[in-house]
Image (cartoon, coloured by chain):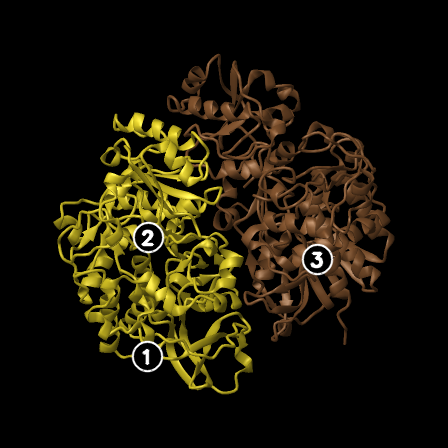
Chain colours: A brown, B yellow
Amino acid sequence: MYNNDTNLQDVFTPQEQNEFNDYFIFEDISVNSTSSFTAVLRRYQDITKWHQELDVAVIGFGGAGACAAIEASDAGAEVTIFELASASGGSTAMSSAEIYLGGNGGTRVQKACGYEDSTENIYNYLKLCNGEQGDDDKIRAFSEGGVSHFNWLVEQGVPFKDTEFKERAIMVTTDDGILYTGNEKVWPFNQVAKPVPRGHNLHVQGDNGGPLFMKIMTENVERRQINVEYETRALTLIQDSDGEVKGIVVRQNQQELNIKTRKGVVLCAGGFVMNEDMLKRYAPMLSKCNAPTGNPGDDGAGILMGMGAGGAAINMHEGLTTLPFYPPASLTKGIFVNSAGQRFINEDCYHSRVGNYCLQQPGDRIFLVFSVNDIGDYQDSNYMGADIAGTGETLAELEIELGLPEMSLQQTVEFYNHYAAKGEDPKFHKIPEWLEPIEGPFAALDCSLGRGAMYSMFTLGGLDTLPSGEVLTGEREVIKGLYAAGRTTAGMPRTGDGYASGMSVADVTFFGRWAGRTVAAVATE
Amino acid sequence: MYNNDTNLQDVFTPQEQNEFNDYFIFEDISVNSTSSFTAVLRRYQDITKWHQELDVAVIGFGGAGACAAIEASDAGAEVTIFELASASGGSTAMSSAEIYLGGNGGTRVQKACGYEDSTENIYNYLKLCNGEQGDDDKIRAFSEGGVSHFNWLVEQGVPFKDTEFKERAIMVTTDDGILYTGNEKVWPFNQVAKPVPRGHNLHVQGDNGGPLFMKIMTENVERRQINVEYETRALTLIQDSDGEVKGIVVRQNQQELNIKTRKGVVLCAGGFVMNEDMLKRYAPMLSKCNAPTGNPGDDGAGILMGMGAGGAAINMHEGLTTLPFYPPASLTKGIFVNSAGQRFINEDCYHSRVGNYCLQQPGDRIFLVFSVNDIGDYQDSNYMGADIAGTGETLAELEIELGLPEMSLQQTVEFYNHYAAKGEDPKFHKIPEWLEPIEGPFAALDCSLGRGAMYSMFTLGGLDTLPSGEVLTGEREVIKGLYAAGRTTAGMPRTGDGYASGMSVADVTFFGRWAGRTVAAVATE
């Protein structure tokens, strides 16, 4: 299995050593050591003792769980959050917490920065991002409700500054409020929707959105009548003979407790990126990556519990991959080539789309080839960690050093330069901003899988749900009493090809809230 | 939904109008019109009347169901097969029924044709074929048991001639007993295993293995004490409060019947290739293909029933795609290029691997470019149905006609020809046998998706099972009383990239038999 400490160090930058570390000591997100987790259902009729009874049990205190609990509580339900770790946060606290929102003319920050973003515009963009497996109901709801969700977040105290971060970057290093975090400006996305930035960044210096976001959400939970049980592992759902979920078994202080729910259980227990066995079985492509992104609780338990109650897990092969090859943005002027020395993508795409394409290349080598002049401050600013694979005064020299077929790279660059000089890229449609003939001396970074470059990833598959959070069977029938949100579900974002940073935190909070409202509205006897 | 008649015509060649049509009239495989199929579980304790009680209920009378029933019966169990259609056959009868087997030194046919095939050799080959998601237990068992399975088939009366069909072909047009049906001879497979043919073809003229195979299996069933109920749709499993499957509800003559099973239910109900909604949700890439291959009963019902009882469906995104671009084999000397005018595969690969790569290309065009001299009898012999997209005395002319970027195809062919003249393909490793400079006049076939070329496919995802046929939960715990085989399961073949014709019929019969033996061995009270 993956090593917890290693992961955290892979994923976090030195900037994380900041003021919020006092609040969120990541090493404190310890996992209950009870190992014999099982999602085998308990039958309602077999339970002889109920240890607790309440309206709503929310499983997991990350972004989705916090939002579900807040909304359920605000709608009058009695809520307890059960959290495996000894603190709130989940994977949301470990993220940058960019929040991808737009539509309805634009959020306050979008408008202040001079952008107009219609609902159809974001809808068209998200439709292309999610392809065949996109859930039209979720995309539509998310497009229509984005501005309202932004306003709700602001009401909860989440701060956004009305300024734009204009660099091509993986994450904001300032406190600016918005940036491009996806493929909005590039082909083919620029053919279906007007490019606007939608990645909302919290008003905090450096890449510290996640800890701040979860600090604010935790304070919101604490301010309400919401009970939180930490260091408590959800073991299995309790289902009656009609298939209705009536409670959950949790483990706390070495004891199993039967929790009866009057309204329902909301699974917000994260994805399965830390479950190596599930990755291999369900998402073989992702299992090639070397940097799983998430907290140790992303072990698939939420998905497995839902499956145990008849829920269908869908889109399980998909995930977000990232290959953070910039900054420096100047590397975008380079070209990615595979083992055949051939290009395969417009390099101005967002790094996650590039990473996804890299994963799918035949052969075992991926190089980023560029003019040495464009290396910029690669050594200091880059997150990818790829080594220099070769350099050369000429392409023929570089070809030999990289072990590429003689003439292959020379042809590729000849073609590229011929058109780049005219501001064109007829093969892959890189936009003119980044098109420039690549001149010697040349250098290449080794972005091959398994040779040092960081390929981080998390999962985008999970329980099939309605936008309301109701969990569905394989035939899309609702399972009574069972709700889910966050990476325990297949949410709005469905593909690595079309992912944009901030889609996940936006999705888990947007649909987390909705699940909270849905479960709170369940009539009790 | 797909049109039944259209599919059959797409999939079948004129040769199917033959002697076996008297026995297997495909239009007779009619689907019970009861539409409100639901896999919502019935609880054992809710059943007040049992209409029938038996040892083993086998659901589906295709290749897997037939073999499961025969083995269970031979082990002394009382067996009934419930079949949706009005005749036996399933998708096995619609296939060529090539049977992919080897190992243990070789089958009788392999040896007679001069091939030695060790167990490690087939194991190494299958490991590469199935990649990360390969099930090592199944691959190992299949490699070790192949010859024994071949002998069992012969004992049942399945005839194989000890001769080899040596052409590069999609299917045998003679009665020869063995041929290459996969990627054994090509890169990278030839790097890990010694190439040997393993596609065993029944001793019958033309592509008529499927009907003959199911005729023989049906006679074997009829010869035994096995009851068969046709035109009977399995609706849902019956499970007790401990999660054990105790029976099945079927619909027959407009009535629901509760069938109690003393030993177990074996789901052999096919895959989900005919369920457009499931394809979109689980296998978005496959849903782009225009020719689903299977019978109307491949509607996912078996998988959904299993999921309803807590079974995990895995590998659901994968399937077999075929692009039958040969015969004539001479087209293998051509090159496939994508919208960027770039090659992407060694064209000597098996057509299914080529089809799989075509599906994954960026852009919306795929062309097969070749010397007009190599067109052979394309019009008469080819199954793909692709139109001529363009011709040209020069590549520059052809480039324009195909709408490819100027210079792109010229560069590609220049590079290819330079090395082909030396018998080399440093980019994609086509073997020397097919390497020859491509000379004008040139022609190109339009193999783009959605422009007429036939992309046929079926699904390779389904219930997770042990080699024994026991169905597993998401945590790989055995569900008592429930067994499965065939395309209702994720079997031995797991990827389109590495599929070889005959893997499916071999897999469904091999593991179908094992499921039959497993369920027969269950002790009854």
Q: Do the residues marked 3 and 1 share a common chain?
A: no
CB atoms of marks 2 and 1 within 8 Å: no
Nearer to us: label 3 or label 1? 3
Identified by mark 2, the residue type is: Met
| Residue that lies at the very extreme toward the top in this rendered image | A393
Identify the element where label 2 is drawn: loop
Q: Chain of mark 1?
A: B
Does residue A421 show up?
Answer: yes
Circle nearer the viewer, 2 or 3? 2
Q: Residue at x 16, y 53 (%)?
A: B109
Residue assigned mark 3: A141
Q: Which mark is residue B57?
A: none
Assign a secondary structure to mark 1.
strand
Q: Position of residue B127 (x, y in %)?
A: 36, 44
Crowding at dot 1, Cα within 10 Å, few <14 / some 14-19 / many 20+, comes out as many
Towards the viewer: A249 or B234: B234
Residue type, mark 1 in image: Val
Q: What's the CA distance linking mark 2 and mark 3?
A: 42 Å
Q: CA distance from mark 2 to mark 1?
A: 38 Å
Q: Residues within 10 Å of mark 3 (few under 14, many from 20)?
A: some
Quadrant of res A94: top right
Instruction: Tell me which numbered mark, 2 or 1, is placed earlier along the sequence.
Output: 1
Which residue bears the numbered disc 2?
B384
Asked if residue B298 lies left or right of residue A248, the reply is left
Mark 2: few/some/many CA within 10 Å (<14, 14-19, 20+): many
- Which residue occupies the foreground of this view, A37 or A412? A412
Residue A506 percent coordinates (x, y): 71, 48
Residue B194 seen by the camera: no
The label on residue B228 is: 1
Subunit ID for the residue under disc 2 = B
